[in-house]
Amino acid sequence: MTTVEETIPDALQPEVEAALAWFNQSEDVTFEVTGILDPKAALEASGSRDLHLILCGGDRCERRSFRVTQSGSGYEVAAGEDDSAPESEGQAPARLDPPPGARRSWLDRALTQHAFVVLVFYRGFW
């Protein structure tokens, strides 16, 4: 069973920040980390860490994997394995879209632009 935590453990914070900075370099929207999958497994790893993060930016949230290795005073970050496999293969459950509060700013912006907003929920997705 996949464990999802909204709070990043302090011991993983530098690696998570390095992965986020690396990811944001190639994106036109700034993303933020809204969750981490199986943080205990990442903490138990020695050497390179595989981080599975929930990243949200603009109007989308994505699950991305990163391999983070300490290199001198910094970190080397590379993309992890493909995250596109369905939940039946042990991936993040559908209820992660959206993580709590991830699109709060989007809703606030939409409400200032329109008289009302209709949100459609379908099996955990919106």
Image (cartoon, rainbow, N blue to C red):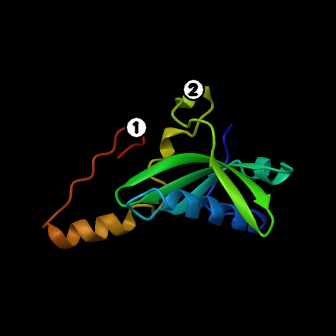
Q: Tag 2: Cα neighbours inside 10 Å, few (<14), some, or many (≥20)?
A: few
Residue, far left: 115
> Left or right of 76: which side holds 88?
left
Vertical side of 80 occupied by 102: above or below? below
Query: Along the line of sight, which residue is nearer the eye, 79 or 53?
Result: 79
Say which mark, if any, is on residue 88: 2
> Left or right of 118: which side holds 69?
right
Vertical side of 120 occupied by 88: above or below? above
Based on the displayed image, in which of its 4 quarters is residue 15 positioned? bottom right
| Residue tagged 1 | 123
Q: How many marks?
A: 2
Residue, far top: 88
Residue, far bottom: 112
Helix, strand, or loop for circle 1? loop
Specify the quadrant that holds the N terminus. Answer: top right
Q: Residue at x 47, y 62 (%)?
A: 31
Q: Position of residue 88 (x, y in %)?
A: 57, 26
Q: Residue at x 14, y 66 (%)?
A: 114
Query: Along the line of sight, which residue is nearer the eye, 63 or 87?
Result: 63
- First in sequence: mark 2 vs mark 1: 2
